[in-house]
Image (cartoon, grey):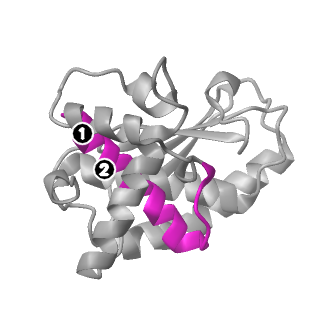
Amino acid sequence: MPINKYLANASGEFGTEILNKIEAGFKEALPVMRDKLKADKIDIIYVNAPKNVISEIGIGGYSPGPYSIYVSLDPKLTTFSVKDMVLTILHEAHHCMRWRKPGYDRTLGEAIISEGLATLFEEEYSGKTPIYGQVKIRQAEIKKAKQNFDKNKYSHSEWFFGGKDIQRWFAYTYGYQLSKSYSKKVNKSAGELVNTPSRLFLV
């Protein structure tokens, strides 16, 4: 089944440098997605959306469901590397496959593990922990998260991007730590754990 690439570049603002990185990143990510995730039936859409870019990286990624990935770019920001592009795609591809089974975010706990596994998947490929997996999380945040694991009504933005009592990227780092701990326990990679129920990670 295909994995397709689409450029939303009607403005023509994606210059040669960005277009070359898109092409190189797609070609590098494709065999990894297929080999490590058995990924298929995914459309990857590259969009001109500067407000959705993670400033520290230069790219943003979003998977709204099991069959599509949006990669957000800023035409004026070309400092990201091909590797950054690859890791963004791999992170979101992990989400796509998890969306299909067992699901991405019916509860806060599920969302935390889904993001943690995708972050770990990046690390396994690059050998480096993504910046959003390196937050020095606090015990008070962990306690609050545990109290809300089973909640299906929660603010995704607050838990993952920061709120009054939650620091930026807390849930990414906490999910990454839980995922890595379980990965070591069962001796399986993030790719192999893509369909594993979240409850097994939540301790």
Q: In this view, does 188 lie to the left or right of 180?
A: left
Amino acid type, residue under disc 1 in the picture: Lys
Secondary structure state at the residue bearing disc 1:
helix
Q: Name the spot of residue 154 as percent of width and height, x first.
A: 28, 22
Front: mark 1 or 2: 1
Task: Say above or below: 78 vs 81.
Answer: above
Residue 190 place in picture, x, y as percent: 36, 68
Q: Determine which residue is flagged by label 1.
A: 146
Magenta: main secondary structure equals helix
- Point out which mark residue 23 bears: none
Q: In this view, does 14 lie above or below 185?
A: above
Q: Can residue 37 be seen in this view?
A: yes
The residue type indicated by label 2 comes to: Ile
The answer to whether residue 135 is above or below residue 51 is below
Q: Residue at x 39, y 35 (%)?
A: 140
| Residue holding disc 2 | 113
Instruction: Report the span colored magenta.
Output: 105-131
Tell me where residue 200 appears, x and y as whole percent.
Answer: 16, 59
Q: Is residue 191 visible?
A: no
Q: Is mark 2 on a helix, strand or loop?
A: helix
Out of 137 and 67, give the one closest to the viewer.
Answer: 137
